[in-house]
């Protein structure tokens, strides 16, 4: 091969590589919100980031508070002391994961700001204590979604208020044909918290958990608001060992891809959204 032919081949190859890079799907940007009471979020946020990024073409960024109270000062969302909450906190992201335990955050203006991205159509994933956040009033009784203290439950699609002692939970996938659960096998957790179901609103159950005589929905989907925003939730995930379990991370990854519209009917990632070599 002469020098002219070699240079032409090199130029062609370089152009093809640039074209491939331009056509390659961009990773989904995910905002993971963590912090608050009762959980080892310092470790769990990193476990979730590593687990999701290993399973799908996503980039997980943190909005984390090291505060262990029921009112963690998550400044990116709630604003700094004296500031108004930020309804644009999710701008530029494809999905928000609510893994915060903000059970004492009860200001309706803050709750409205937290929900605003989802009203606007940004999908949501909610893990464990996310279900017990943003509550006030007599929330231990069934709350109408039309009530001031029912807005978070309307987004979640299910109202939960508490749990019993930690014991293993036998998880059964009840909706076998959902792309989120297709091919997944039933399993049993280590000692975990089984959240109650005060009322099931618009949630579509995917899995139930049995612990002693209690048998509750533990995983579900919902469509929220005027844009029918996709929302995936699971109440499993109190202990770090559970969060690190491959079966848990597989489930949450599928929830993420389903919520963003990047999960095929057979439960596999859409083209370009599976694992990416790092």
Image (cartoon, rainbow, N blue to C red):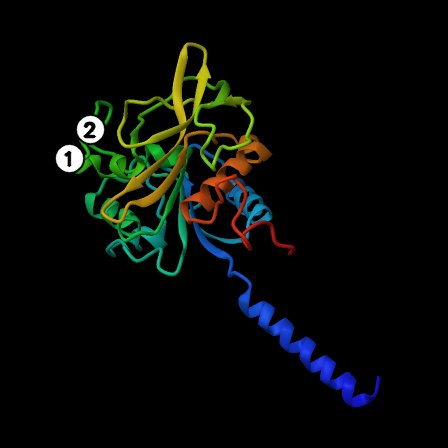
Looking at the image, do the residues carrying marks 2 and 1 touch, with CB atoms under 8 Å apart? yes
The answer to whether any part of residue 245 appears in the image is no
* Residue neighbourhood size for the residue with mark 2, other residues' Cα within 10 Å, grouped as few (<14), some (14–19), many (≥20): some
| Residue for badge 2 | 143
Q: Residue at x 46, y 29 (%)?
A: 236
Residue 208's disc is none
Q: Residue at x 29, y 36 (%)?
A: 104
- Which quarter of the rendering shows the C terminus? bottom right
Q: Is 56 on the left-hand or right-hand side of 62? A: right
276 and 4: which is toward the camera: 4
Q: Position of residue 172 (x, y in %)?
A: 48, 22
Location of residue 50 with respect to 139 vertically, above or below: below
Element marked by disc 1? loop
Location of residue 113 with respect to 215 vertically, above or below: below
Q: CA distance from mark 2 to mark 1?
A: 7 Å
Q: Is 253 on the left-hand or right-hand side of 10? A: left
Furthest-left residue in this view: 147
Element marked by disc 2? loop
The answer to whether any part of residue 250 appears in the image is yes
| Residue for badge 1 | 147
Q: Is 119 on the left-hand or right-hand side of 26? A: left
35 and 167: which is toward the camera: 167
Location of residue 115 with respect to 252 vertically, above or below: below
Q: Residue at x 47, y 28 (%)?
A: 176
Q: Position of residue 157 (x, y in %)?
A: 29, 34
Q: Position of residue 191 (x, y in %)?
A: 52, 21
- Which quarter of the rendering shows the N terminus? bottom right
* Residue neighbourhood size for the residue with mark 1, other residues' Cα within 10 Å, grouped as few (<14), some (14–19), many (≥20): few
239 and 246: which is toward the camera: 246
Marks counted in the figure total 2
Furthest-right residue in this view: 1
Place residue 188 in its image quadrant. top right
């Amino acid at each position: 091969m002469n020098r002219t032919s070699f240079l032409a081949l090199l130029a062609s190859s370089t152009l093809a590589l640039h074209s491939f890079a331009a056509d390659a799907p961009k990773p989904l940007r995910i905002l993971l919100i963590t912090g608050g009471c009762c959980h080892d979020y310092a470790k769990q946020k990193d476990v979730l980031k590593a687990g999701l990024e290993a399973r799908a073409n996503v980039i997980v960024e943190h909005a984390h508070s090291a505060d262990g109270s029921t009112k963690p000062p998550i400044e990116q969302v709630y604003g700094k002391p004296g500031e108004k909450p930020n309804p644009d906190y999710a701008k530029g992201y494809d999905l928000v994961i609510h893994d915060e335990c903000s059970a004492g955050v009860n200001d309706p203006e803050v709750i409205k700001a937290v929900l605003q991205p989802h009203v606007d159509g940004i999908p949501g994933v909610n893990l464990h204590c996310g279900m017990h956040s943003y509550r006030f009033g007599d929330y231990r009784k069934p709350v109408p979604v039309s009530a001031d203290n029912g807005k978070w439950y309307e987004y979640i699609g299910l109202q939960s208020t508490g749990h019993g002692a930690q014991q293993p939970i036998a998880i059964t996938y009840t909706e076998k044909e959902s792309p989120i659960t297709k091919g997944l096998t039933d399993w049993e957790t280590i000692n975990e918290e089984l959240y109650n179901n005060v009322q099931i609103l618009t949630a579509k159950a995917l899995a139930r958990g049995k612990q002693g005589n209690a048998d509750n929905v533990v995983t579900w989907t919902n469509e929220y608001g005027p844009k029918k925003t996709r929302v995936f939730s699971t109440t499993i995930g109190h202990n770090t060992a559970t969060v690190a379990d491959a079966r848990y991370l597989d489930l949450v990854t599928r929830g993420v891809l389903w919520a963003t519209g990047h999960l095929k009917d057979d439960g596999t990632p859409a083209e370009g959204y599976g694992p990416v070599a790092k």
